[in-house]
Image: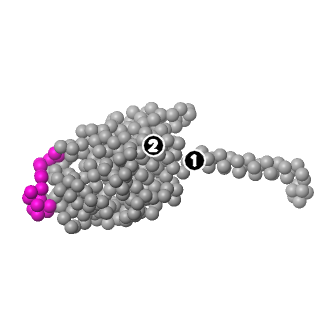
Amino acid sequence: MKELHSDPGFRRLWALAIGLICTTASIKAQQLPDSVTVPLIVEGNRPYITVTFHRRDGSTRSARFLLDTGGGGFLITEPLARDLGLEWGATTREEGAEFAPVKNPPKAFVGNFPLELNPKRVSVIIGSDNVLPNAVAGHADGMLPGHVLSRYHVVFDYPNATFTLARPGVLTPRGDPFPMPVSKGPGFPRTEIEVDGVKSGLLLDTGASFTMVSEVLLKHWGSEHPDWRRYPGAFGEAATLGGQTLETMFVPGGSWQSHQLNEFGVVSQRAGTFERYMSGMMTAPIVGSLGGNVLKHFRVELDYPNEKLYISDR
């Protein structure tokens, strides 16, 4: 063995091999960006971006995806799944829709930034070409949810219509940090707003077009302030939510951390929806979700790894 190592030819081959390995690793590192910024499309108070898929034959397919910090699975509509050549397993029904787990998860990219997908949480929506079938406004071929986003540091820059996705520790945050506890597993971020001097815990929910609260809280505000505008069902812009809405109320003002909120609308959901069901997926109890009608006025920066939130007007 000593004779082999001392052979000049062997040493040259060994050096070439090490050089090739280092060069290959360097090329791969160069091909994997630390961050990407892409256009953010906001329609009906919901944010969308383009996600690109690589087929097995090397071709690509672009699709429109909803960015949903409050979403569960990485969802793909059936037409898109078929176009990508995906295979799926047995179907299940949930809330009136039919889903099936994907057997061969696709390679998905935002720009040239590869997404890390959990194979067990990629599903096809059977028989649908829109992940928002009940929404009055908006169309998406898929949904990029909280558990995927929570791997990264992300920026929803609503005023400037851009979305940034970055690996942990890459971005320099802008503004003062605020607590943003993130639930393990679902990756749901929690925040708080203050109305009438009282703070309420909410899910920070980019996928919701309109802010929602428990009917208990809305009725309390109504009893304390009978002059606040109040309507049965989904009124005006609240209709973009789709689904069932009990009431719509317009709160004259409040604050989100250090930022003042002008009049904003909320809709109510049945008692227990947030207090029992959704709170079980959060780090602490919530009474609603902060939706797009409020978020669209801000640059919202979510440092998931450090559980910090940064908010600015521009």
Task: Point out the image quarter for the N terminus.
Answer: bottom right
| Disc number for residue 32 | 1
Residue 233 among magenta residues: yes
Q: Is residue 133 above or below residue 176?
A: above
SS label for mark 2: strand
Q: Position of residue 160 (x, y in %)?
A: 38, 45
Q: CA distance from mark 2 to mark 1?
A: 16 Å
Residue 32 among magenta residues: no
Residue identified by numbered label 2: 38
Side of 247 where 254 appears, left or right: right
Side of 164 where 270 appears, left or right: left
Q: Residue sitting at 21 percent across and 62 percent down? A: 195
Lower position in the chain sequence, tag 2 or tag 1: 1
Q: Nearer the viewer, mark 2 or mark 1?
A: 2
Side of 187 where 114 appears, left or right: right
Q: Position of residue 40 (x, y in %)?
A: 39, 43
Q: Position of residue 257 (x, y in %)?
A: 31, 63
Tag 1: residue type?
Answer: Leu
* The quarter of the displayed image where residue 259 is located: bottom left
Q: Residues within 10 Å of mark 1 (few under 14, many from 20)?
A: few
| Magenta stretch in the rendered image | 220-235
Tag 2: residue type?
Answer: Val
Instruction: Examine the rendering and report whether any part of residue 28 can be seen.
Output: yes
| Disc number for residue 167 | none
Q: Residue sitting at 45 percent across and 58 percent down? A: 173
Q: Residue sitting at 12 percent across and 56 percent down? A: 228
